[in-house]
Amino acid sequence: MEKFKKISFLPADVLIPRPGTDMSKWSVVACDQFTSQPDYWDKVKQIAADSPSAYHIIFPEVYLEKGSADERIKKINKTMSDYIKSGIFTKLESSFVYVERKLPGGSMRRGLVGAIDLEAYDYKPGSKSLIRATEKTVLERIPPRVKIRINAPLELPHAMLLIDDERKEIIERLSSQKSKFKVVYDFELMQNGGHITGYHISKEDAGEIAEGLYTLMKNKDFLYAVGDGNHSLAAAKECWEQKKKTLSADEAKHHKARYALVELVNIHDDSLVFEPIHRVVFGCEPESLIKELDDYCSKLTGDEKTIKYVYGGKEMELSIKTPPGELALSCLQSFLDLYVSNHNCKIDYIHGKDVVLRLASSAGNIGFILPAMQKCELFPAVSAGGALPRKTFSMGEANEKRYYLECREI
């Protein structure tokens, strides 16, 4: 256990819905997906209906601004408690879950579910922690998530953390050993999410994992990069910091709130493709926005880059200059943050060019189409310059994101 503590990735008491549960109704995609497509979540609600489902114990972000948030959170917490009391879960004590996810395109993504020590995670700029954010954390996005988590008796992970294991010696090795592990779930995910299989790995069977991560840690500036779910982890961190103030030093060493369940994925997994995250601004005057963006960027010096934008059925380009070494996105995001604040507009972050084109075809909307970041650039970029602009990249399309499945009592 000491080695697990040193790498800050530990076995957990993982809760899995008991045999007989309709898992295709239980498991739903991460709450921060399809935020501009309420029809997707209407369909999830229809599928989940009155069955046990993660849908009933998460807060899809598409509903965050719909009002009655406090009532929804109370209902979520009550449903969590009811699920625990009714015994719908099987507990895998002090365990990991090895996950194989066949994505809709046919490729296989491999991951390992376990608990991170939040004491080793710091999302602040300039962090030198073992677990680091890859994108700038928007502080205003943390309180709503804290509100959801602070009194919740369960957590469900959609956070995916990356390791830089170029030799593929840690997670991938489990694939060749999986025949000796018990299958704890195996089913089709709803809404074209692909197929997922989970294997139970006890603490006693996880020695090679600990050794591999410990060896990797000795050769890295940091060990884990938060690929998805940084704001959810930031909320978990804030909840822990609040809780810690009420505990003795000894109590704080072992308290459940000190940990957060995540899925670990190797950045070199063949299935892992970095997709761009595009921007759509709603309720603006596109021509005026572009003129202000051009004026904003004309005051900058540096390398010339191109930004693509679309509105009214027209796709165009704007040349801008950015400081040496910075992404064009850095300039664009800084401008958009100011613009939406000053003009009372709304911005959303969109997966898929086709969705951008559809949304930007409506009057008063404009879309920005961005290129993909190379995944080999991520760890060096975070190590050298800290967190990237928020929503710089996405690990796959929206329906390839992590689905809520495993739980843990907190």
Image (cartoon, helix red, strand yellow):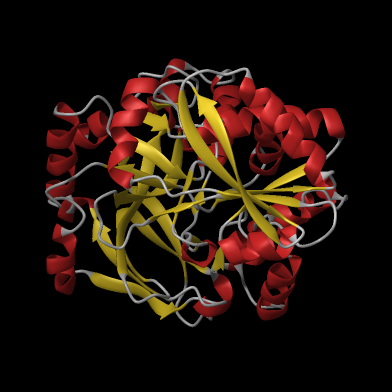
- Quadrant showing the N terminus: top left
Q: Is residue 398 left or right of residue 379?
A: right
Q: Quadrant of residue 108?
A: bottom left
Q: 405 or 358: which is nearer to us?
A: 358
Q: Is residue 191 left or right of residue 16?
A: right
180 vs 221: above or below: below
Q: Is residue 33 left or right of residue 270?
A: right
240 vs 58: above or below: above
**Picture residue at 75% right of the left edge, 30% below the top:** 292
Q: 315 or 38: which is nearer to us?
A: 315
Q: Give the number of callouts.
A: 0
Residue 137 in picture, x, y percent from top left: 56, 30
Residue 272 in picture, x, y percent from top left: 33, 57
**Picture residue at 70% right of the left edge, 25% below the top:** 295
272 vs 49: above or below: above
Residue 130 shows in the view: no
**Picture residue at 53% right of the left edge, 48% below the top:** 370
Q: 315 or 384: which is nearer to us?
A: 315
Q: 362 or 163: which is nearer to us?
A: 362
46 vs 410: above or below: below
Residue 300 in picture, x, y percent from top left: 57, 19
Residue 231 in picture, x, y percent from top left: 57, 38
Q: Quadrant of residue 30?
A: bottom right
Residue 167 shows in the view: yes
**Picture residue at 75% right of the left edge, 34% below the top:** 291
